[in-house]
Image (spheres, rainbow, N blue to C red):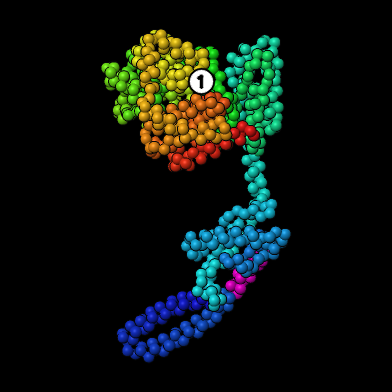
Amino acid sequence: MQNNNRKVFDSLLSRTKIYLAIILILLVIISIENINMILPSVLLYCVIVGYTYYANKKRKSEISETLQDLTLTVDTAAKTSLINSPFPLIILETDGNIIWRSTKFTTEFANIDINTYLNDLIVDIKEEIESGETGNSDILTELKIGNNMYKVMGRYVNFRNRDKDRKNKKEYMVILYFIDDTENIKLQKEYRDSKSCVGIIMVDNYEETIQRIDAGEKPQVTAEIDKEIYDWANKTNGVLIKSDRDRYVYLFEQRYLDDVREDKFSILDKIKDIDTNEKVQFTLSIAISNEGNTDKEKYKSAQNAMDVVLGRGGDQAVIRENEIYKFYGGRVEEVEKRTKVKARVVAHALENLIKDANKVMVMGHTNPDMDSIGSCMGIYRLAKTLNTNAYIICSDNTPALESFMDVVKKEPEYEDVIINKEVALENIDEDTLLVVVDTHKINYVDSPELLDKVKKIVVVDHHRRSTDFIEDATLMFQEVYASSAAELVTELLQYAETKVNLKTIEAESLYAGIMMDTKNFTFKTGVRTFEAAAYLRKCGIDIIRVKKWFQSDLKSFNLIADIVKKAEIIGEEIAISTYNEVTENANLICAKAADELLTISDITASFVLGNTGDKICISGRSIGDINVQVILEKLGGGGHITLAGAQVDDMTMEEARQELINRIHEYFSEIES
C-alpha cells in the first residue's frame, strides 16, 4: 500500500514542479522588463510556493486515506472470496507443506486421503518448474479423486522465503482450484455412446453356394442364417434390416461397440457351423464403421470397409474407426468362384481402356518376381494386339529375374519395351493408362510416383486387400481365390473379344508365374488354375526352359541348407530361422528357405528372416492350417493364408525375430479365445 501511495505522490509532485518552474520564468521575464516588479514578483512567488506546499500536503493526506480504504476493501473481498470459494481451494508450497485450505476443500475430501493425490501433483509441478522459466505460470490438468473427475486449475508463483535457513533458495507457492467435472464428462460420454455405428453384413458367394443345396432345404437354411444374424444383432439392441437376399444393414449405438469387439464376431463361426445335407459351408463378411457426421456418411464408410473385406477373401469382419481397420476372422482358405462372368466383364472393360489410351505402362511390385513380370508380359501383349504402344516398368538388377532377363534380352522386340521408372516418369502424359499387376498396395508398387501422375489406373491382383490399397483405380480385378496374378491375366487374355496370340516367351513367363506362386502346382490351386495352365500349355511353352529359370546354383543351395539347419521350432509345428548376411537378394533366399522348411514333416508353417541392408524382410509359408497372412499383417505385411511376406524398419534381426514370435503367440491366443 505504501508503494502505491508513493507512486501517486511522486506523480503529483512532478507536475507541481513543472507548474512552479513556468511561473518562475514568467515572473523573471516581467521583472526584467520592469525593475519595479521585482519585489512584488518575489512576494507573489513565495505566496504561490507556500500555497502549493499546503495544498499538496492536504491532498496527500486525502489520497492516502482513500487508497488505504480501497486496499482494505479489496483485501477483505479477496479474503472473503478465498474463504467462501464455491470450489475446493488449497495453497501449498512445492515441498508439500500446506499453507491454507478452504472449508469447501476440507468437506469435499473429508473421507479421502488427499495427500496421495497432492504429492503426485506436486511432483508434476516441480518437473514443470524445473523445465520451464521461473515466475508465474498456469496449471491445468485433470485428476480422478475417488469416483469423481476434477479439473485442477491454478497458478504457482515465486515468493521470498523469510526462513533464514532457506532464504537463498527459490521457493514457489501453489494455489489450486478443484472443479468437479464429473457430470460434464458423463454427458460427453453419453453423447459419444449415443452416436450410431453402421454395419453391413453379407453372405459370401450366396448365389453360387445356395445353388448347391437341394430346393427343399433352401428355405430352412436361409431361415437359420437369418435367425443367427438377428439373434447376434439383438445382443446390442441394434436394428437389422435385410436389404437383399444376401445383404443386411446393421445399425446400433456406439456404447455397444466394445461388446462387439470382445465378442470377436462369434457370428462368423456360428454361420459356418450351420449344417446342410450337401455339407456346404456358408460364410459372412461384416463391415462396421463409426466414421462420419451422419448415418449416410457412416454407411458409405462401411461400404468402403466392405470392399476391403471382400478383397481379402471374405469370411471375416472389420471395424473401421479413426481411419484404422481392425480385422477379425479370415482364417480359412478362400473359396474359388466357379463363374467366369467377372473375368469376361473386366476383360471387355480393359480392352476399351487400352483402346482409348495413347500408351500403356505396366508395372509390378518392388523386387519383382516371375508372377509380377509374367503378368506384365501378358498385359503388354494384349495392348500390342490392340495396336497401342506399351511399356513394362521393371527395376534394374533384380536377382529373382536374372535367368529370365537373360532370355528376354535375346528377343529384339523387348529391347526398348522394358524400361526403368525414371524413363517411365519422363514419358507419361494425360492419355497414359497405368496397369498395376501382382500388388494393390500404394507403397509396394515399383514406382509410387507414377500413381500420382496418371489419371487412369487398372489393378490386377490376387493378394488379400490391405488398408493402404490404391483407392482411385478406374478398374480393379482383385480375386483372392486365384493362385497368382498370372492366372488372372491369363483369364483376361482368354476372354478378351480380340484374339490374342501370345509369343512363346510371354506364355512361358505367365506359366512360370503360376508355377512359382503355387510351388509347382502344390498350393492354392483350383480348377481355374489348371485351366489357365492348360491354355498356356497350348501356346507351345517349353516346360524344361521354365524350370531352368528357378534353378539355384550349388552355393545358394548350401546357403539355404544352412538356414534350414539352424531353424528353431516354435509350438511343435512352426519353424523360424534367420539369414544374417546383409544382401539385396535376402528376400529371395528367405523365400526359398521358407519353402524348403515346409517340406519337413510336422512343420505346418515356416518363417525366415533376412537383412536387405535397410530393412528386415520376413517370408512366411504354410500348408493351410495356419494363416501366415494374418500373422505378418500385424507386422505391416500381407499376402495369402499359405504365402505371405513383410518388411520391418528400425529393428535389429533379433528384435524382429522376437516381435514375430510375439505375433505368433498373439495369433494363437486370438484363436483360443
Location of the C terminus (image quadrant): top right
Location of the N terminus (image quadrant): bottom right
Name the residue beneath numbered marker 1: 524
x and y, in percent, of residue 487 in the image: 45, 17
Which quadrant would residue 251 be assigned to in this image? Answer: top right
Q: Is residue 302 left or right of residue 190?
A: left
x and y, in percent, of residue 75 in the image: 61, 70
Residue span colored magenta: 69-84
> Circle 1: is it few (<14), some (14-19), or many (20+) Cα within 10 Å?
many
**Position above or below: 355 against 456:** above
**Position above or below: 6 against 341:** below
**Position above or below: 15 against 334:** below
**Position above or below: 666 against 475:** below
Which quadrant would residue 265 be assigned to in this image? Answer: top right
x and y, in percent, of residue 98 in the image: 63, 67
What kind of residue is marked 1?
Answer: Lys
Q: Main secondary structure of the magenta part?
A: helix
- Element on which disc 1 rests: loop
**Does 381 lie within the magenta span?**
no
